[in-house]
Amino acid sequence: MDLELKNKVAIVTGGTQGIGRATALRLAEEGASVVIAARGRELLDRVAAEIRAAGGSVAAVQADVSRAEDCARLVAEAVTAFGRLDILVNNAGTSATGEFESVTDDIWQADFELKLFAAIRLARLAIPHMKQQGGGRIVNITNIGAKQPRAKSMPTTVTRAAGLAFTKALSKEFAPHNILVNTVCIGSVRAGQHERKAAKAGIAVEQLYANMAKDIPLGRVGRAEEVANAIAFLVSGAASYVTGTSINLDGGTSAVL
Ligand SMILES: NC(=O)c1ccc[n+]([C@@H]2O[C@H](COP(=O)([O-])OP(=O)(O)OC[C@H]3O[C@@H](n4cnc5c(N)ncnc54)[C@H](OP(=O)(O)O)[C@@H]3O)[C@@H](O)[C@H]2O)c1
């Protein structure tokens, strides 16, 4: 199926590891020019080289998306590099959970800045370009906990629930401009954050994945490429009537639709 992504320009935040890296590679493979953003220079250069080696077109922008000025520079550099902006994938993020009484204002604030305000600011900066071009796509990565918050799952589940409301409200406001906005709610997917957690706990990452898989109906942790496929569909011509929705990418884990 032709996803109609040739000549499109996509920003993927957190595009150097896990889901973001897989998404950047997938969109580039489909012919989109990709702008990857992350804080670490070394991985930015490495993933950019990987995309170029596969024949893709890429720009790598060092940015901390929890900072307003970095968001503005990211969008400006994307438009300077490729002359337009069609797709925004708000993916950068990390898990932040703890016992409610130990979660300080600073932890709450940092989570909002990284996982909610980054998406708000980048969408506000991207939308004028999308309007000018007659349309665009925004995908906000969230978490299945947004719909089904567990004990000790804050601040992440609260920030992610706001991400769902943001997605829906934005989709309704900008549908007349053909800007389609959706969210992908992630369950458990192989990625850098789990490798770091395993290293911290002193266990092999495969052991961690095996433990996590026990609660997943499909019996395994997902692969970043499986999420990238869903994102590629949502930003493609094949999803031209899909907006304001959420897709659970969780191997069947969530109890809610
Ligand atoms: N993997 C899962 O099981 C899972 C589950 C639920 C939700 N999610 C969500 O899915 C998204 C991707 O997760 P992942 O597991 O693929 O993550 P990952 O492998 O840990 O990669 C995170 C990416 O985000 C970048 N990043 C982190 N903080 C950033 C910041 N302030 N500014 C710019 N870039 C930043 C990282 O690069 P630098 O560190 O160099 O900046 C890296 O490229 C996240 O939003 C995560 O919360 C994942």
Image (spheres, rainbow, N blue to C red):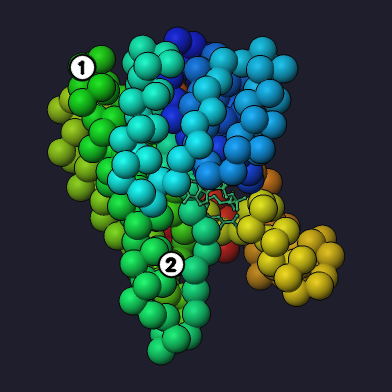
Q: Amino acid at mark 1?
A: Gln
Residue at 22 percent across and 42 percent down: it is 170
Q: Is mark 2 within 8 Å of ligand 1?
A: yes
Mark 2: give few (<14), some (14-19) or many (20+) Cα within 10 Å.
many
Is tag 2's residue or tag 1's residue first in the polypeptide sequence? Answer: 1
Q: Residue at x 35, y 32 (%)?
A: 73
Position of 252 with respect to 110 (left or right) is right
- x%, y% of residue 227? 57, 42
In terms of depth relative to the viewer, which is nearer, 143 or 9? Answer: 9
Disc ID at residue 132: 1
Percent of width and height locating residue 57: 57, 15
Residue type indicated by callout 2: Thr
Residue 245 seen in this snapshot: no
Q: Is residue 202 left or right of residue 82?
A: right
Q: Which mark is residue 15?
A: none
Q: Is residue 33 above or below residue 103?
A: above
Q: Is residue 98 visible?
A: yes
- Furthest residue in direction bottom, as rendered: 101
Q: Quadrant of the C terminus?
A: bottom left
Quadrant in the rendering for residue 52:
top right
Give the quarter of the image for residue 237. top left
Query: Foreground residue, 175 or 23?
Result: 23
The CB of the residue at mark 1 lies under 8 Å from ligand 1: no
Place of residue 204 in the rendered image (x, y in percent of width and height, measured from the top left): 84, 65
Answer few, some or many: residues within 10 Å of disc 1's Cα (few below 14, many 20 plus, some between 14 and 19). few
SS type, badge 2: helix
204 above or below 172?
below
Label 2, label 1: how far apart the Cα atoms are: 34 Å
Q: Is residue 149 placed above or below 14 in the rendered structure?
A: below
The residue singled out by tag 2 in the image is 156
Is 188 above or below relative to 60?
below
